[in-house]
Amino acid sequence: MADREHIRTRIQPLLRAEYACAGRLNRLLDAETQALVARDVDAIERLIEDKQSVLQEFETLEAQMQQLLHDAGFAGAARPDVEGCLNWCDDRGTLIRGWRLVLERVRHAQQQNRINGATLESARRHAQHAVAILRGQVPEVDVYNPAGATAANVAASRTLAKA
C-alpha cells in the first residue's frame, strides 16, 4: 500500500477539480434548460458541445482517481472503494466530505440531464404530431393502458388534409 500522506496530497486537488467540473456541468445544464424553454437551437448546439468537453474532463479526472485508488490498494473489488480510501488517508474526514459534495453535484446534474432529456423528447413528439397532421396522416396519440404504461392509440377523427 502507498503512503497515506502521499495519497491524500494527490487526492485533494483531484477532488477540487471534480467538484469544479461538476459545478460547470450543472451551470451548463441550467443554461440548456433555459435554451430549451426559449427554443434557442444555436444555444442548445453550443451547450451540447460544451457539455461534451466537460464530460471528457470528468472522464480524465475519473481515470486519475482510478489510478490513485489502484496505487493505494483500494481498486481490487469490482467497484473501487473510494470512501474506504478517503477514510484511510484522512483521519479528519475532510476528503470524505469533499467527495460527498462532488457526488451531490453529480446527482443534481444527472437529475437535470434527465429533465432536459424529457423536455427534448416531449418537443420531438409534438413536432412529429404536427408533421403527421400536416401530411394528412392520422397521428398516433400516447395513452395509458390499464398497467400504467403508455401505448399508441390511433386517433379516429378526420385529419386536416381530409377536412
Image: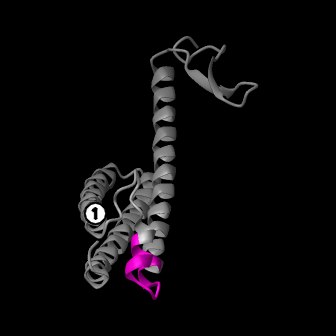
Q: Position of residue 12 (x, y in %)?
A: 31, 80
Left or right of residue 155, residue 77 in this image: left
At which x and y percent is residue 67?
25, 63
Between 85 and 18, the residue placed more toward the observer is 85
Residue under the image location 34 percent in, 59 percent down: 75
Q: Secondary structure at mark 1?
A: helix
Q: Observer-nearest residue: 86 or 17?
A: 86
> In this rendering, does residue 146 appear at all?
yes
What residue is pinned by disc 1? Answer: 70
In this rendered view, identify the residue nearer to me: 48 or 74: 74
* 99 falls in the magenta region: no
The N terminus appears in which quarter of the rendering? bottom left
The magenta region covers: 85-96
Dividing the picture into quarters, in which one does residue 124 lie? top left
- Look at the image and say whether residue 88 sits in the magenta stretch: yes
Whole-percent x and y of residue 153?
Answer: 64, 19
